[in-house]
Image: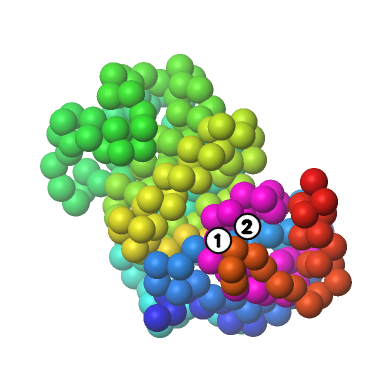
Amino acid sequence: MLLLQVDHVSKSYQTRQQVLKNINLTVGKGEIVGLVGESGSGKSTLAKVIMQLETPEKGAVFFDNQLMARHNRAHFYENCQIIFQNATAALNPVWTVKELLQEPIQSQKPVTDSYLQTMLENVRLPTDILQALPSELSGGERQRVNLLRSILVEPQLLVCDEIVSSLDRLIQREIIDLLMSLNKERDMAILFISHDLKVVSYLCDRIYVMNAGEIVDESPKKESSFTFTDNYAQMLFQAIRNV
């Protein structure tokens, strides 16, 4: 069952050349899909278009078979959430962790300290940080708070835009394992955007390769590996095999 469909999307900025060129991409319910490419290839712009933070000049984006432009925004953001690369910038610096976690869900249900503490344990955060400010947390803790904020509303789709690129390998692995657990336990679909091919290869069921604003190849995982026909995609993935 298709959950997300990006249909022939193009996007340009006045000061730049065309950033997205006829993009087609899908994410199925419960699927983990990777989107890889070098910096500047258009990955983050595509994420913003998917999240209705940017408007495509051509094409359309559908969520759960509904055109996103016509989708009720509140309902959409309950079902589709994004985590950005910069964990610090995504958190209000004057709010405590408790306030940051309460904000997304306080209109839906009562939020008790015991509930938040249970959720903190689920993402391997200490339960005594509810009164801490973002500046008092480590980089890995801040990104876990962002992850928890996103999943508290129980979305069907989580868009992750370079969320582990600034973390050390041990913390990266912990975040990736958390995502895999959420996918299995909640059947939550994930669009994982990254330039780290090793991480994407480990995590994802299917991978799209992006180059200069275009999707140049796509491959499902078969027997723990991916097969690409495009020369650029082959070059990228050959590089990680040689490491």
Please give left or right for residue 118 compared with residue 139 in the image: left
Q: CA distance from mark 2 to mark 1?
A: 6 Å
234 sits left or right of 164 in the view: right
Q: Which residues are magenta?
A: 192-221
Label 1 amino acid? Cys
Q: Is residue 73 visible?
A: no
User: Which of 219 and 38 lies nearest the eye of the viewer?
Assistant: 219
Q: How is colour applied across the structure in the image?
A: rainbow
Q: Is residue 209 magenta?
A: yes
**Is 106 on the left or on the right of 62, as rendered?**
left
Q: Position of residue 171 (x, y in %)?
A: 53, 33
- Determine which residue is flagged by label 2: 201
- Please tell me in which quadrant of the rendered image residue 166 appears: top right
Q: Quick one: SS at disc 2? A: helix
Q: Percent x, y for residue 135?
A: 49, 20
Residue 48 point in image, percent of width and height: 57, 59
**Mark 1 crowdedness (10 Å alpha carbons): few <14, some 14-19, many ≥20:** many
Could you say which is closer to the camera, residue 80 or residue 166?
A: 166
> Tag 2: Cα neighbours inside 10 Å, few (<14), some, or many (≥20)?
some
Q: Residue at x 43, y 52 (%)?
A: 180
**122 or 135, which is in the foreground?**
122
Image point 77% across, 54% down: which residue? 241
Is the Cβ of the residue at disc 2 closer than 8 Å to that at disc 1?
yes
Circle 2: residue type? Ser
**Residue indicated by mark 1:** 204
Residue 86: in sight, yes or no? yes
- Name the residue: 74% across, 73% down: 228
Q: Is residue 73 above or below residue 182?
A: below
Quadrant location of the N terminus in the rendered image: bottom left
Q: Is residue 11 left or right of residue 32?
A: right
Is residue 200 placed above or below 7 in the rendered structure? Answer: above
